[in-house]
């Protein structure tokens, strides 16, 4: 099995559309571990950041500092909430809850990848050399340059929106009285003993070239301004080894009581095939017709637009964390994740 895993990853190393491929796998119940590449090499984890933000919000809820069903206007300035969800001419921002932000059921427009009125996207502009943005910019874009997907909490509806997690980051700052970076450091990074994980910011711009080089197709790209702008929805830098440590802690109840995990997975809503979203968590499950009729257990965790994945299989007790550093071909990391899962140890 290790030889087959190594051959698979070497195949991905040779591709012209991958860069600095690194993965760490573990099955705690059997003590099995395996790595490829340098597990201590830093890379942009992009939207896997949302798991860290989720952990912070659930911590605060457990401590009674906020409620998951609180309207967000309880924790944000009125001018932030006003205009977030104008549906059929009625402003429904007051209906949005913390839980809806976590579950992408708020209906709020996605400032990052949803098309603006001129047909462009914020991410596309950034890739073309555009400037970065602030929290206020992101909220303004979502309010004025695109429409909400649906009214907050519409039955059966879900739509992935990075704006939700920008707002969650602001809620964390308001409730803790600290910056998102400081809350992350004191509540997640330090308790887990992580030394290479941090929020990329204007003060860490000089560390950008330490990260795994990102590709857009086969073309190298530089997006430090994006990384300084995305914050609580995608700005964390980490490593495969520390990502694995975080993911295991997340599902073991080290960051918040494990009883919340059931609530987070109670209802899965489709966001884009084959991904579903619970409360702060992604679920990746392929039908057998897409795996040669081999059983590939569902994986719970998150992915990132940088080509990063961090997933756990409850059925087999398998954890898989890593990156291919590919921005354009979003399915590439998932295809590799699937193949790794099929080659790793079976049911624990």
Image (cartoon, helix red, strand yellow):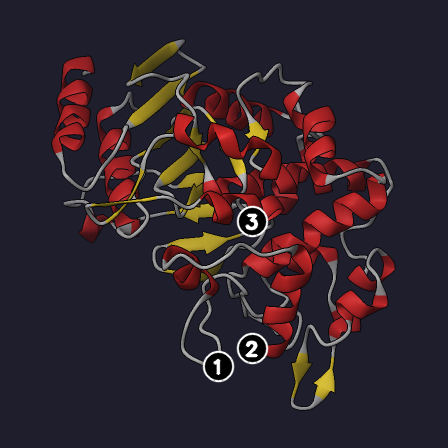
Q: What residue is drawn where x is 44% and y is 14%? A: 29
Q: First in sequence: mark 3 or mark 1?
A: 1
Quarter location, residue 150: bottom right
Q: Residue furthest top?
A: 31
Q: Earlier in the sequence, mark 2 or mark 1?
A: 1
Q: Residue furthest bottom?
A: 89
Distance from disc 2 to disc 1, alpha carbons, whole Å, reads 6 Å
In this figure, which residue is indicated by the disc labeled 1?
Answer: 117
Residue 193, above or below 244: above
300 horizontally vs 265: left or right:
left
Q: What's the distance in space between the residues labelled 2 and 3, CA to CA?
A: 18 Å
Sequence order check: which comes first, mark 2 or mark 3?
Answer: 2
Q: Does residue 104 appear to the left or right of 40 in the view shown?
A: right
Q: Residue 40: percent from the left, percent from the top?
A: 41, 16
Circle 1: is it few (<14), some (14-19), or many (20+) Cα within 10 Å?
few
Task: Answer whether residue 348 is visible to the viewer in this image.
Answer: no
Q: Tell me the SS state at disc 3.
A: helix
Residue at the spot x=38%, y=41% of the render? 298
Q: Quadrant of residue 261?
A: top right
């Amino acid at each position: 099995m290790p030889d087959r895993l190594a051959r698979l990853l070497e195949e991905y190393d040779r591709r012209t559309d991958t860069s600095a491929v690194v993965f760490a796998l573990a099955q705690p119940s059997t003590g099995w571990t395996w790595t490829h590449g340098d597990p201590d090499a830093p890379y942009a984890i992009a939207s896997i950041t949302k798991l860290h933000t989720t952990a912070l919000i659930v911590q605060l809820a457990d401590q009674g500092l906020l409620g998951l069903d609180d309207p967000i206007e309880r924790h944000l300035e009125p001018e932030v909430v006003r205009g977030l969800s104008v549906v059929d001419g009625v402003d429904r921002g007051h209906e949005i809850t913390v839980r809806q932000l976590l579950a992408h059921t708020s209906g709020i427009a996605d400032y990052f990848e949803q098309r603006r009125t001129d047909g462009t996207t914020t991410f596309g502009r950034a890739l073309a050399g555009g400037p970065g943005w602030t929290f206020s910019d992101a909220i303004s874009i979502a309010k004025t340059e695109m429409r909400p997907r649906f009214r907050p909490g519409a039955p059966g509806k879900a739509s992935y929106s990075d704006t939700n997690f920008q707002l969650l980051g602001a809620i964390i700052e308001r409730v803790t009285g600290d910056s998102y970076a400081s809350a992350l450091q004191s509540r997640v990074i330090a308790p887990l003993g992580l030394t290479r994980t941090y929020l990329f910011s204007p003060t860490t711009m000089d560390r950008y070239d330490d990260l795994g080089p990102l590709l857009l197709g086969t073309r190298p790209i530089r997006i430090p301004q994006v990384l300084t702008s995305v914050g609580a929805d995608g700005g964390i830098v980490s490593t495969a080894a520390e990502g694995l440590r975080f993911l295991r802690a997340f599902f073991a109840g080290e960051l918040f009581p494990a009883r919340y995990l059931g609530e987070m997975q109670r209802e899965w809503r489709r966001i884009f095939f084959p991904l579903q979203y619970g409360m702060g968590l992604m679920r990746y499950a392929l039908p057998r017709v897409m795996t040669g009729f081999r059983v590939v257990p569902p994986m719970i965790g998150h992915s990132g637009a940088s080509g990063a994945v961090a997933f756990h299989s409850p059925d087999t007790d398998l954890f898989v964390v890593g990156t291919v550093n590919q921005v354009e071909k979003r399915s590439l990391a998932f295809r590799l994740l699937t193949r790794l899962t099929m080659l790793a140890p079976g049911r624990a």
